[in-house]
Image (cartoon, rainbow, N blue to C red):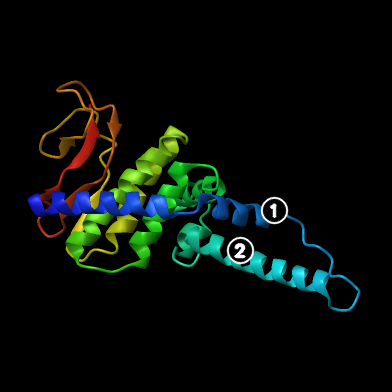
C-alpha cells in the first residue's frame, strides 16, 4: 500500500507538471482553426501571399491532426467512436465528445485529455500504470462533475473497464453506486470530514482480478 501511495503521489506531481507545460493558448488557436472556412486559393502566381496561404493550410492540417490525437480518435475503438444511443459505449462517446469540445476553454477538460492521452500512449510496469490510471480517474471526476450527473454515473464504470484493458492483473471499478462510507473500499480524501455520507467520489477503486481483493481503495469526499 505504501508503494502504491508513493506511485500515486508521483503521478500527481507528473500531471501537475504536465498541466503546467501545456500551452493552452496554442491549443485554443488550433481548435479555433477548425471553425474557420477554407480560403480560396489565389489565382496569381506564387508569391508572398500564396506562400503564406500554403503555410496556413499546412498549419491547419497539423492542427486537425493534433486535435484528432488529443481526442483519442486514433486510440478509441469504433464501438465508442460510432456508438449509438442504445450501445454500451455511447456514454463514453458523449464524454470524449464533451472533452474535445471544451478542452480549449476548460482546464478540467484539458487536464482530463492530457491524463487519458498519457495513460494510453505510454507503457510501464503495472503498478506505475495503476497510479497513472487513478489520476486519470481523478481528472475524469473533476471534469465530469461539470456535466450532467447521469453522464458521470453512466460513463464512470465504462471508463473504468476501458482503463482496465491495459492491466494484466488488476482492474479498476467505479463506486458511484455507494452512498455510505465503507472503510473496506473507501479512503477519505483531503478536505473530508470525519463522518457523514459520501459527497463526492474522487478516484476509482482498484482490485486484484484473480481474487477480487481490494488493492487500492477509492478516494471519496465525506
- Circle 1 sits in a helix, a strand or a loop, which is it? loop
Q: In this view, does 89 lie to the left or right of 28?
A: left
| Residue occupying image coordinates x 91% and y 73% | 43
| Residue occupying image coordinates x 40% and y 50% | 20
Asked whether the viewer can see residue 168, the reply is yes
What distance separates the C-alpha of mark 1 from that of mark 2? 11 Å
Q: In which quarter of the image is residue 117?
A: bottom left
Q: Quadrant of residue 124?
A: bottom left
Image disc number at residue 35? 1
| Residue occupying image coordinates x 25% and y 40% | 175
Disc 2: which residue: 64
Residue 10 point in image, percent of width and height:
22, 53
- Circle 2 sits in a helix, a strand or a loop, which is it? helix
Residue 188 point in image, percent of width and height:
18, 33
Q: In which quarter of the image is residue 122?
A: bottom left
Q: Residues within 10 Å of mark 1 (few under 14, many from 20)?
A: few
Q: Earlier in the sequence, mark 1 or mark 2?
A: 1
Asked whether the viewer can see residue 1, the reply is no
Residue 94 point in image, percent of width and height:
50, 47
Amino acid at each position: 500500500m505504501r508503494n502504491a501511495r508513493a506511485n500515486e503521489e508521483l503521478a500527481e506531481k507528473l500531471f501537475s507538471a504536465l498541466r503546467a507545460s501545456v500551452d493552452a493558448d496554442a491549443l485554443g488557436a488550433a481548435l479555433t482553426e477548425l471553425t474557420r472556412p477554407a480560403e480560396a486559393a489565389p489565382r496569381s502566381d506564387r508569391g508572398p501571399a500564396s506562400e503564406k496561404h500554403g503555410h496556413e493550410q499546412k498549419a491547419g492540417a497539423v492542427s486537425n491532426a493534433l486535435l484528432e490525437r488529443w481526442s483519442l480518435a486514433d486510440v478509441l475503438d469504433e464501438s465508442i467512436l460510432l456508438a449509438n444511443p442504445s450501445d454500451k459505449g455511447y456514454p463514453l462517446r458523449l464524454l470524449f465528445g464533451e472533452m474535445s469540445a471544451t478542452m480549449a476553454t476548460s482546464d478540467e477538460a484539458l487536464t482530463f485529455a492530457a491524463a487519458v492521452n498519457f495513460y494510453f500512449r505510454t507503457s510501464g510496469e503495472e503498478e506505475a500504470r495503476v497510479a497513472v490510471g487513478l489520476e486519470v480517474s481523478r481528472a475524469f471526476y473533476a471534469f465530469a462533475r461539470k456535466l450532467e450527473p447521469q453522464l458521470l454515473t453512466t460513463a464512470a464504470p465504462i471508463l473504468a473497464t476501458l482503463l482496465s484493458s491495459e492491466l494484466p492483473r488488476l482492474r479498476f471499478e467505479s463506486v458511484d453506486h455507494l452512498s455510505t462510507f465503507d472503510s473496506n473500499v473507501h479512503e477519505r480524501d483531503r478536505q473530508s470530514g470525519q463522518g457523514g455520507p459520501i459527497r463526492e467520489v474522487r478516484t476509482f477503486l482498484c482490485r486484484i482480478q484473480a481474487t477480487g481483493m481490494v488493492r487500492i481503495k477509492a478516494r471519496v469526499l465525506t
